[in-house]
Image (cartoon, rainbow, N blue to C red):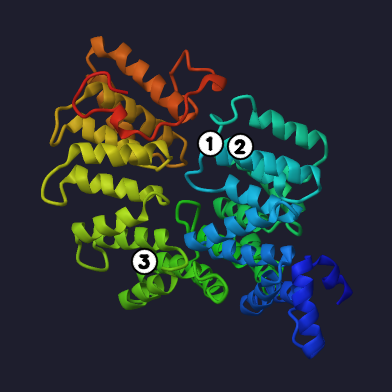
Amino acid sequence: MADTLRHLHRPALLGLAVALGLAGCAGLPDQRLANEAMKSGNVALAQQNYQQLADLGYADAQVGLADIWVESGDPAQLAKAEATYRAAAATSPRAAARLGKLLAAKPNSTEAERHEAEGLLKQSFASGEGGTLMALALLYIQYPQSFPGVNAQQKINEWKAAGYPEAGLAQIILYRVQNTYDQNLAEVERICKAALDTNDVCYVELATVYQKQNRTEDQAALVKRLQDAFAAGKVIPARVDAVARVIANRELGTPDPKTAQALLESATGTYPGAWISLAQLQYDNPDLGDTDQLLGYIEKGHDADPSRAELLLGKIYYEGKVVLPDAAKAEEHLKKATPDQVSAYYYLGQIYRRGYLGMVEPQKAVDNLLIAARRGQNSADFALAQLYFNGRGTVPNPANAYVFSQLAKTQALATPQPRQEVLDLAKTVEEQLPPQLKPQAQRLLQQEVASRGVAPAPGITSMVPQDDVAPEKDDPQQIAVGEGEDL
């Protein structure tokens, strides 16, 4: 009790004194009880105690409450968490660190928010708060244009040399961004085996390594360890959800839907967003349940993860595998999924490119596909190449077709089994490109590569140095359908 009193602000102490005088200690909220309840997965009990202490002005309880909101994944709850962290940051180093991490991972963050995140994370690291270097690395890697004076690999090397454990995890993030993850699976495994007990994100990384290498026995042992750790409150449910999605991902290796289903069902009690993952799993594996069950899962998880729920509903009506296809309903749901879900732009672009609403709308197709492509959506560059090459609903543009077919080819060649249609289109476009347009097309390709800050396509020379890479452009008007040098 004395420990609790020392941490409360003066107004809270007055209210607490009244409560003590009236009822003794019996009905007081308990920070330690809240912490233990959180570890054991009893979110309701944790939230009840955190809320009562937070109302009394107890900063650590405010942070604990905000942590629950962050874990929910609900955008409205995330906004509340940010406001709570910000209010407590002046007196709580823990809140300042949480705010920095939240801003670093915030979708569509502003330039000011990114630099605020950097300042908070540096300050938190200096004061000994954990987990800050990973967030800082992610910030530098995701937004090189915001930190032109920082070389992410050099910074990670400095952290490694200084012996900071988080440096290894930061290196893994960089491997992912640079598309060199598959070439470094052994190092990823080594790093994460050493860090598994202290950082549960390593369950996801090890699951990915084992899935890619088809190591079923190692994967089964990892899942068992994850289930035990989750039951003991040592792993957050969001991590269970993430591992399940890895195990169910056909692009990573042979999927195991039944194991993924069991993991997701165990997480739904404390992590409602897992209902959306369950719905996606069932959509990809129809033998796991019927359409009514699938839609029921989406309804249960919608409020916790609305953008992902709307994306899945949009795909359901777009593809028409379990319901009758309905382009208008697909468009409605997909628009609600933007801007958080990049894939929503891709599907919207395909609806407009293919004329599913009654007529081809080429400018709308470019507007959406270009945003998707520049934000890393697979297949968006290929769709743009098709649009400019075939000219359906617009005038063909050989130069733009060359740009996007080359970018699509580069992505395809980075995968274990490149799509032949992508390689064939790139070859055809290059062979049919008029010689007088080739210098212009290559210049446009260099500009597009530089605008994205991605690795150059094979054969591209005189690339813009990394320090001079232009900011990412999400302005779809940079390319006007059917015109000349528009990039």
Q: Residue at x 69, y 43 (%)?
A: 120
Q: In this figure, which residue is indicated by the disc labeled 1?
A: 111
Q: Residue 71 at what x, y percent from top left?
A: 58, 63
Q: Residue 59 at what x, y percent from top left?
A: 72, 63
Q: Residue 333 at what x, y percent from top left?
A: 30, 59
Q: In this figure, which residue is indicated by the disc labeled 2?
A: 115
Q: Amino acid at mark 2?
A: His
**Earlier sequence position, callout 3 versus callout 2:** 2
Q: Amino acid at mark 1?
A: Glu
In this rendered view, identify the residue nearer to me: 233 or 73. Answer: 73
Q: Is residue 90 above or below residue 220?
A: above
Q: Secondary structure at mark 2?
A: helix
Residue 237 occupies quadrant: bottom right
Contact between marks 2 and 1 (CB within 8 A): the answer is yes
Image side of residue 69 versus residue 275, left or right: right
Specify the quadrant that holds the N terminus: bottom right
For the residue carrying disc 1, how many other residues have a C-alpha within 10 Å: few (<14), some (14-19), or many (20+)? few
Q: Is residue 211 above or below residue 40?
A: above
Residue 26 occupies quadrant: bottom right
In this rendered view, identify the residue nearer to me: 252 or 177. Answer: 177
Q: Residue furthest right?
A: 2
Res 187 seen here: no
For the residue carrying disc 2, how many other residues have a C-alpha within 10 Å: few (<14), some (14-19), or many (20+)? some
Q: In this figure, which residue is indicated by the disc labeled 3?
A: 283
Real-space CA distance between mark 2 and mark 1, rounded to the nearest whole angstrom? 6 Å
**Earlier sequence position, callout 3 versus callout 1:** 1
Q: Which mark is residue 453?
A: none
Real-space CA distance between mark 3 and mark 1, rounded to the nearest whole angstrom? 38 Å
The mark closer to the camera, 3 or 1, is 1
Q: Residue 133 at what x, y percent from top left?
A: 71, 43
